[in-house]
Amino acid sequence: MELDLAAVDRCTQLLEPVIYTTPMVESTYLNDLTGHRLYFKLENLQRTGSFKIRGAYCRLAALDPSEARRGVITASAGNHAQGVALAAQLLGLSAWVVMPERAALTKVEATRGYGAEVRLAGESFDDAEAVALGLAKTTGRVFIPAFNAPEVIAGQATVALEMLRQRPEIQTLVVPVGGGGLIAGMALVAKQRWGSKIRVIGVQAAGANAAAQSLAEGHLVEVPGSHTLADGIQVKRPGEVTFALMQAYVDEVVTVSDQDISRAMLMFLERMKVVVEGAGAVGLAAVVSGALGSRVKSPIGVVVSGGNLDVSLLSRILQKGLVEEGRQLQLSTVVADTPGHLSQLLAAVARLGANVLRVEHERWNPELDLGQVVVGLVLETRDAAHQREVLEDLAFHGYRIASQRSFRTKNFDN
């Protein structure tokens, strides 16, 4: 396929009976917080929970009859896997998917639920891809790239067409970047159809920033040992095709920390009532953290690329987000192991308006003096300022405070 606007238009027609036209929504709270008009493209509500069905279906629909009979194989950490599995089911094809051994259980089971055969191999997407490529050679199955194929890129590009038809006033597109298929397609559409009016900014996790480094250095850069909670964009290097398109059409790629990402996920859940995975939250993280800088123009269209989040991981991320937002405080102190001292401590906390979530005692620490007990508290607080108020007041009343991890009895004399 020649990758141009005509190809994207053909994919749009092909996808019309297959995908949802996902909504674009805004939040008054987030507009006020950031000082920007933000429109969120909720591809987390797309079929399979992400935008990936778009490119996968376009690629599989382009197979010739002999290729279709051989079946397909792909590699994915989860979202592309589900896209290929559903596309194969809809088109009546056999599909194998290789996923990393640590892939989220929900993504593995969802992929199987769409009828694909799943094999687990390797620690990362790149490991799984190497296994899939080997199986493609030995079995004759057609390998379906997660991002580095014209049909896949053209399918992902339809996100930009939808966004700019839904909100033609958008001046900036903020797009998650892993291997680059989504941003490459979206940038091609934005720049070729709307020109310099639209600024296209990619966002990567700081722990997996191969695209950002590649663009900065002017050639493909591999980032080994990458790590981020945004596993959907945890890729060691962008593709050759996607990188060339990014060089031609993307204005900038910025990075955000996992701390920024977890806070953004919490904001989505608490303020917009939507569940968003780490990769889908990087756009909001970039806006809120200031990573986009002061030159960005509103209105801003932010792609929320997926919502396939493991429930057990969700609880840990929310916990981390609450801590980062100053909503939970963990502390420990030493009090006398006699009646009344614990109640005095808890009364002091209650007086300050903090809610006690958990209380723990430790009497058997060999560093404790006889008659002492370590009390560990997990408190619910309003924000970072409230936490400082709690800590300062407790210190004023004679309590020596430390985190439970750094506690040493000799630091306390209460």
Image (tube, grey):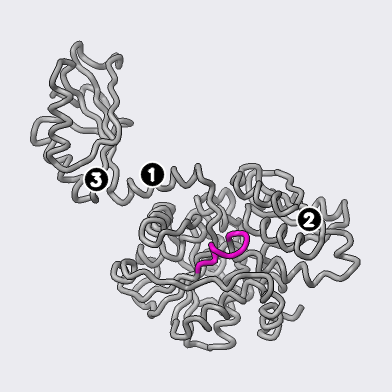
- Around disc 3, counting alpha carbons within 10 Å, would you say few (fewer than 14), some (14 to 19), or many (20 or more)? many
Q: Earlier in the sequence, mark 1 or mark 3?
A: 1
Kind of element beneath mark 1: helix
Kind of element beneath mark 3: loop
Q: Which residue is mark 3?
A: 381
Quadrant location, the N terminus: bottom right
Q: Position of residue 113 (x, y in %)?
A: 69, 50
Near-viewer residue (300 or 21) = 21
Q: Which residue is mark 2?
A: 95
Q: Is the residue 299 above or below the residue 86 in the image?
A: below
Near-viewer residue (291 or 355) = 355
Q: Is residue 174 located in the magenta-colored stretch of the structure?
A: no
Q: Earlier in the sequence, mark 2 or mark 1?
A: 2
Near-viewer residue (13 or 232) = 13
Residue that lies at the very extreme toward the top in this rendered image: 370
The reply to whether the C-beta atoms of the residues labelled 1 and 3 are less than 8 Å apart is: no
Q: Which mark is residue 319?
A: 1
State which quadrant residue 290 falls in: bottom left
Q: In the rendered structure, which amino acid carries the disc numbered 3?
A: Thr
Q: Position of residue 80 (x, y in %)?
A: 66, 59
The residue drawn where x is 50% and y is 51% is: 228
Quadrant location, the C terminus: top left
- Around disc 1, counting alpha carbons within 10 Å, would you say few (fewer than 14), some (14 to 19), or many (20 or more)? some
Asked whether, in this view, residue 15 is left or right of residue 394, the answer is right
Q: Position of residue 357 (x, y in %)?
A: 29, 36
The residue drawn where x is 20% and y is 33% is: 401
Q: Tell me where the magenta segment starts and ends, as one range.
A: 42-49
Asked whether, in this view, residue 5 is left or right of residue 281, the answer is right
Q: Is the residue 100 above or below the residue 70 in the image?
A: above
